[in-house]
Image (tube, rainbow, N blue to C red):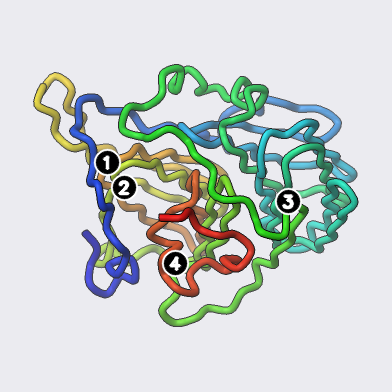
């Protein structure tokens, strides 16, 4: 599936393989640079979009903005993609401070995030929070569970218990490691390094995922997501290829089993890939998940 020079060519394959294609699903989009915000209040502007197993909340926060969760069902992530974005994350008796360019993992229950100077913040939840799902303009696309994605199951709890965790994004490049990957019980996040200049179109990476969606969050640059749907037995269900041109910030949710690759077309480009629950194939690669010691893998 991958070129032999791509680090992902060494990933373990799916043991079960894909379910037969009996229904095809469209890609979903959150075009935050174009669409009006879902919320605009004293905290700033916020946009929402969902996939089968996750909800993305992208906010342009005003100074002093406070984002709280009460009785949160499970862990969620808070991404501060920019430097000089001081934040305070608190839950229970634990408080962590960050200057920005960081990732928080927030525990279930009550939690609070304060953006002292405002700035961009991305909160990433599982879809187990009905109040957040209801905010998503594309919620109807998942009124029925997508048949080629198994029911959501969180990964095992951290051995030292749930708490606020703080990780810097300032991680040096290391040969043999794909991107910068973190996971918790509900979410996996992969942040490749910024790409300078357009992508070499002679070295793209078409691939597919048998039974999970890929959420591609574009933070900088112009992107094109190229997608090809497999053929079903019923030709009336076939899809044309899609070459979706999107600016930043935006989210593109790529359906399971769809062959896809992305190209970037600006001077500076930044994409973040999000999966829910965490990917086993990435987790099986030694050293790829930067916080693997904090979160055990499932027993299998």
Q: Residue at x 53, y 63 (%)?
A: 181
| CA neighbours of label 3 inside 10 A, class few (<14), some (14 to 19), many (20+) | some
Quarter holding residue 75? top right
Q: CA distance from mark 4 to mark 2?
A: 27 Å
| CA neighbours of label 1 inside 10 A, class few (<14), some (14 to 19), many (20+) | many
Task: Work out which quarter of the rendered image holds the C terminus and state it.
Answer: bottom left
Instruction: Read off the residue under disc 2.
Output: 209
Q: Is residue 203 above or below residue 271?
A: below
Q: CA distance from mark 1 to mark 3?
A: 34 Å
Left or right, 19 with respect to 29, comes to left
Q: Earlier in the sequence, mark 3 or mark 4?
A: 3
Q: Earlier in the sequence, mark 2 or mark 3?
A: 3
Instruction: Read off the residue under disc 1.
Output: 257
Left or right, 86 with respect to 240, comes to right
248 or 286, which lies in front?
286
Q: Is residue 179 above or below residue 143?
A: below
Find residue 197 and name its label.
4
Quarter holding residue 27? top left
Question: Mark 1 falls on what kind of element?
Answer: loop
Q: Earlier in the sequence, mark 1 or mark 4?
A: 4
Q: Earlier in the sequence, mark 4 or mark 2?
A: 4
Q: Earlier in the sequence, mark 1 or mark 2?
A: 2
Question: Mark 3 falls on what kind of element?
Answer: loop
Q: Is residue 199 visible?
A: yes
Find residue 162 and name its label.
3
């Amino acid at each position: 599936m991958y070129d032999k020079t791509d680090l992902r060519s060494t990933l373990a394959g799916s043991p079960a393989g894909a379910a037969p294609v009996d229904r095809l699903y469209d890609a979903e989009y959150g075009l935050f640079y174009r669409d009006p915000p879902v919320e605009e209040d004293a905290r700033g502007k916020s946009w929402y979009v969902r996939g089968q197993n996750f909800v993305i909340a992208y906010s342009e926060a005003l100074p002093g903005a406070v984002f709280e969760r009460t009785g949160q069902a499970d862990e969620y992530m808070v991404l501060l993609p920019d430097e000089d974005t001081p934040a305070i994350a608190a839950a229970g008796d634990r408080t962590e401070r960050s200057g920005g360019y960081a990732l928080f993992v927030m525990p279930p229950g009550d939690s609070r995030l304060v953006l002292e100077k405002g700035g961009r913040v991305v909160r990433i939840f599982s879809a187990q929070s009905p109040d957040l799902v209801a905010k998503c303009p594309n919620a109807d696309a998942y009124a029925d569970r997508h048949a080629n994605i198994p029911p959501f199951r969180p990964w095992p709890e951290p051995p030292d218990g749930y708490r606020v965790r703080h990780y810097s994004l300032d991680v040096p490049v290391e040969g043999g490691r794909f991107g910068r990957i973190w996971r918790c019980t509900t979410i996996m996040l992969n942040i490749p390094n910024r790409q300078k200049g357009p992508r070499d179109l002679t070295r793209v990476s078409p691939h597919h995922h048998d039974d999970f969606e890929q959420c591609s969050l574009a933070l900088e640059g112009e992107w094109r997501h190229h997608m090809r749907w497999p053929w079903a037995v019923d030709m009336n269900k076939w899809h044309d290829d899609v070459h979706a041109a999107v600016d930043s910030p935006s989210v593109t949710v790529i359906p399971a089993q769809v062959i896809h690759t992305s190209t970037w077309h600006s001077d500076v480009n930044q994409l973040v890939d999000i999966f829910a629950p965490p990917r086993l194939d990435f987790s099986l690669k030694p050293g790829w998940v930067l916080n693997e010691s904090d979160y055990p893998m499932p027993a299998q």
